[in-house]
Structures are given as structure tokens and as C-alpha cells.
Amino acid sequence: MQKKIALFAFNGEPMCFVHVLLNALDMQAKGYDVAVIIEGSATKLIAALAEPDAPFADLYRQVKEAKLIHAVCQACASKMGTLEAAKAQGLPMNKDMSGHPSMGAYIEQGYHIVTF
């Protein structure tokens, strides 16, 4: 059975978020089904990390290209002012649970939840 991991990134501190990106790529390389969900203050990093010269921009690009970002919280991206940047990057939006992605929906799909 394939291991399914949902990495919920809430923390908007870049040094924390980089570990979400690193773990997502590492787990994918090891055969895991990985879903990155960008929530809370982490949504403020969406615009900044898309800048080519930003620290960790290459890592962010790799995660996006691997299609590991399954959802961006629509409510939080709106609150943090990055909703349009997320849409421009073609990131999938989620608002299933009062404007936020539902952990329960991922659990129902067999994902183990890890929060950052």
C-alpha cells in the first residue's frame, strides 16, 4: 500500500516552510503520495517565493513543477494578500471548510496529516 502524507504548512516563517518543501520532495522521491497544503500565514510566502532571486525560489519551483501543491487556503491567501499571486501561478485553491481546506477530507482519502 502506498503511503499518503498531507503536509499542512501553516507557519509563514521561511525557514520553517523550506522544510515542508524539502520533505515533500524527499517523500515523493521515496514513493510517497504527497500533498502540500498551504494554509494560514504560510500563504504570504506564495508571492515572495515565486520571485526568481528569492531564497528557496528554486526549491519552491521544483515542488510546483512536481505538482505536489494540492491546495492553497483561499480564505488565508485572501487575508494575506496573495490570492491573485496564487491564481496567477495556477495553484489549486481550496475553500471546502468555511473557506479553508479540510484536514478531515484528506484523512478520509487515507492521508496521514503532518503540520508545520
Image (cartoon, grey):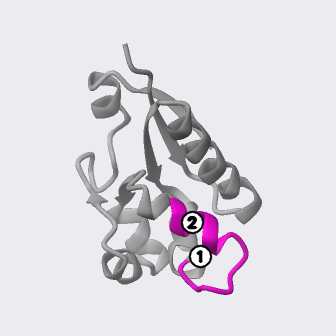
How many angstroms separate mark 1 from mark 2 (CA)? 7 Å
Identify which residue is drawn at 57% across, 66% down: 60
Furthest residue in direction top, as rendered: 1
Furthest residue in direction right, as rendered: 15
Toward the viewer: 24 or 9?
24
Q: Does 105 sit left or right of 30 as displayed?
A: left
| Residue 45 is covered by the magenta coloring | no
Toward the viewer: 57 or 81?
57
Q: Which residue is mark 2?
A: 60
Identify which residue is drawn at 47% across, 55% down: 39
Of tags 1 and 2, the one toward the viewer is 2
Q: Toward which corner of the image does residue 48 lie, by quadrant? A: bottom right
The answer to whether mark 1 and mark 2 are in CB contact below 8 A is: yes
Label 1 environment density (alpha carbons within 10 Å; few <14, some 14–19, many ≥20): some
User: The magenta stretch spans which residues?
Assistant: 50-62
Q: Quadrant of the N terminus?
A: top left
Q: Which residue is mark 1?
A: 49
Residue type indicated by callout 1: Leu
Compared with 40, 45 (above or below) is: below
N-term mark: 1 or 2: 1
Checking the image for residue 87, the label placed there is none
Residue type indicated by callout 2: Tyr
